[in-house]
Amino acid sequence: MGTLVPVRPGRHLAPLPAPAQFEDRRVAVPAPQGAGTPPVPPQLFPTGPDLSAGRVAPLGFLGPVPDTAVVARISQALTTALAVNPQQFTQRDPMFQPGTPSTVAAAWGALLWCAGSPVVLTEHPLIESFIPFLTTSAEHLHWMMPPDFATLASYYVHRLGAGDGGGAAHIARVMYEVAAGLQADPRFRPGADALAAVTAASLRMVNQDMATVRYGPEAILQEWRRRCPAEFATPMVRDTAPGEYLRLALYDLQEIVAGLTGPRPAAAGRSHDEVRRAGIAVLAADLQASPGALQALQHWLDADSARTLQAVLTDPANPLRSLWPRDGRLPDALRSDDSDALAALLATSYTLGLTWCRLAQVPPPATGFAVPQAVAAELTSPAMHTPPSTDELSAWDIIKAARAHMAAERAATGADQPVAPVPEPAQEAPGPPPRWRPPLPRPPRRCLRPPRPNRPPRPRWSRPSGTRRRPRRGRSRSGTPATSRARPTCPTASSNAPTSTATSPPRRRPLRRRTRSGRTCRRRGSRLPRRPSRPPRRRTGPPSGRR
């Protein structure tokens, strides 16, 4: 009898096959009758936030057009990415047009990383926002590869290494706006929750990262992975542990195939073995184009799955090959009218293909993956994809239809014709101009104040003859004492001495100002007389003991 081990937290317990050696099988004996069921050890019960993580491969761009609010928030994040100097955020990625700043590349990488399985079957509004900055046209953007987490962190690390903390914060803000805008769509939510949590924490720790970048880009990458909460860590497994991620995606593939094919014929009590082998057969359909990846993939499979994979690839008559696509079309066993189940099969099989390519270090097959291409052809067939009616058009479809209609009219009429001027309303003919009249004379201005009588001019003040002026203190500007320069006196009107017209007018008395102490001094650089110092006081009492 096999042993129950937890292979997927929160899913189911799959029994392992019995040991192959006879000596090992002799050790196990059946329980005695009436012993009852032994209790399950507590360490076998899975714990942690991964119980409700869901499938590891999100749908991303598959499904209906996202809401207008999601498209508007991504457009706003792109506007934030463009509001920079391209010379400051330079990048040389051939995927983008020359002159595109690295902030736009960071926003594009964040969008693809949150998508998980970036597969576009029809025109998508989130992709069309970035078309002007990409070198690939929209007709060839169908099968894309999401960047690894180290690539997203490299845009942030590049600005930190240049000592531009503000630029690094701007890049983190752009990626946060993209992730926060995608959180409203459940198809992007697993990756968007993880990236929003990491970038939000990085915006508060830019200064610490400026010091950490001295230890290399790997130190910043390790810090970014550490900032992701445990409940959002499922998308991080794709980069940190691709082998474990392959196992988790393989469990999802087995459940999807079992839901599409229904119960398969199996031995009593061994139906789970057929479910696992059916999933391995679908995986082998993609591995047929890359036989070199088989050796690296077998290390992550159990013994029964490895034997099944080898048998399906080497035996053309294996009955499990009935699950392989034929001529690019899905087999009848995998066809269904449920578009959601087919979209989940497409996303999971494409994610598995990218994961084993990363494990084996090989590029994807040149012809593409067989199962995802067959599912995409089934989803885009007229039976599954019908154009919506006028009543079902979304806001984005209406805008696109209006743009296409205006472009068709412009192409049909040629160049834009000038708009005809609007005729002015008819007006009556103006009458004759008014007759000219001379201006009226201005009234004389009245003076309210009577004019002053003509008085004789007042004589200027003069010093009486025979009087002397008080001597000036200090020295004059010429260097001579002020008292030696005699100022000529001005005769009065009563004196009989003749007056001379050549004498200079009397000098005005210098202005004086009053200080705080009440003394007056001149304004122009004059100083008050120095106060004499007091004589020292003489002691009259007995000496104080000092000599």
Image (spheres, rainbow, N blue to C red):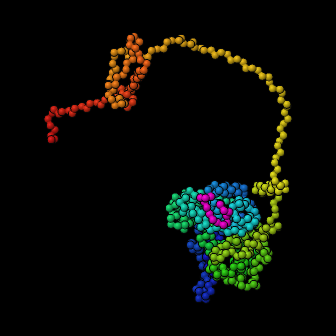
Residue 246 x, y percent position in the rendering: 64, 74
Residue 195 seen by the camera: no
Location of residue 191 by image quarter: bottom right
Q: Main secondary structure of the magenta part?
A: loop
Image spot of residue 464 (x, y percent): 37, 15
**Quadrant including the C terminus:** top left
Residue 240 horizontal side relative to residue 255, left or right: left
Depth check: give the residue in front, 54 or 5. 54
The answer to which of 159 and 384 lies nearer the viewer is 159
Q: In the depicted view, which residue is nearer to us: 297 or 139?
A: 139
Q: Quadrant of residue 493?
A: top left
> Residue at point 39% right, 25% down?
510
Residue 134 falls inside the magenta stretch: no
Vertical side of 468 occupied by 207: above or below: below
Q: Is residue 506 visible?
A: yes
Residue 379: x %, y % from top left: 78, 68
Where are the magenta residues, as a range?
86-100
Residue at 68%, 71% (x, y): give it: 351
For the point 67% across and 59% down, which residue is it? 182
Q: Is residue 412 shown above or below 2? A: above
